[in-house]
Amino acid sequence: MSSTTTQILKWNMKSDYVETCNCDYGCPCNFNGFPTYGSCQTLILFHIRSGSYDDTTLDGLDFITALSWPKAIHEGNGTAQLFITKKANEEQRQALINIVSGQAKGDGPFALFAGTFKYFVEPQFVDINVNIDGKKSSFSVPDVMEVQVESFTNPVTGEEQDTKVQLPKGFIWKLAEAAKSKIMRITTPSLNFDHSGQNAYYSVVDYKGP
């Protein structure tokens, strides 16, 4: 590994955050660390509103983390794959790899989760289609994955529910809008699952390091 990938540089990232997972609504991992069905599988989009890694700008870039653990996250043996927009140049790609792999340290989930993975699948540079609309956001990678998020609604009136979860000490997000996935699926040689109709969150997150 070259010195350019191991040197710890200052970075920051403010992003729209769209999370989907296999847990029931609300995701108990956020509260007691253990998933609804024993394992954890998640697709998460980051749309960077503004950010930088040293003197490399990250504004406007999109990336997706596809993650899977056989048990609770903290019990390890996970698999991680990173999908980065093709729009990123070489410096931006390496910056995002350094951040998401935990090499760049800092707050947020990246450095904390890094130690829970047994397998890091080679990053992919792909077309990412993104629509940011709060609890109605969506994202996809053609022929690889698709996610559509929707609000909870009153079963009688059809009125949308304004549901928020606040975690003052949360390290991923501190305030998020709770939602559900209308579609949530991925098909790759390493990760293959469909958890449509399960938990989702939308938030705006702000991380920095080291």
Image: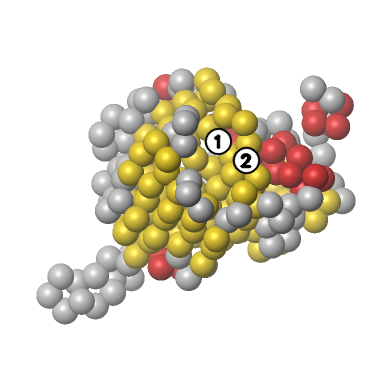
- Viewed as shown, does residue 80 lie left or right of 2? left
Label 2 sits on a secondary structure element that is strand
What residue is at 34 percent from the left and 55 percent from the top?
A: 183
Q: Is 68 located above or below residue 140 in the figure?
A: above
What residue is at 33 percent from the left and 30 percent from the top?
A: 39
Residue 111 x, y percent position in the rendering: 62, 33
Instruction: Check the picture and name the quadrant holding the C terminus.
Output: top right
Amino acid type for the residue under numbered disc 2: Gln
Residue 92 x, y percent position in the rendering: 77, 48
Q: Is 30 located above or below residue 19 in the figure?
A: above
Question: Which residue is most to the front?
Answer: 143
What residue is at 47 percent from the left and 49 percent from the top?
A: 143
Disc ID at residue 171? none
Q: Are marks 2 and 1 in contact (CB under 8 Å)?
A: yes
Amino acid type for the residue under numbered disc 1: Gln
Residue 164 found in image quarter: bottom left
Residue 9 x, y percent position in the rendering: 82, 39
- Residue 96 appearing in the image: yes
The mark closer to the camera, 2 or 1, is 2
What residue is at 51 percent from the left and 53 percent from the top?
A: 142
Disc ID at residue 124? 2
Which residue position holds label 1? 81
Instruction: Check the picture and name the quadrant holding the N terminus.
Output: top right
Residue 107 x, y percent position in the rendering: 63, 42
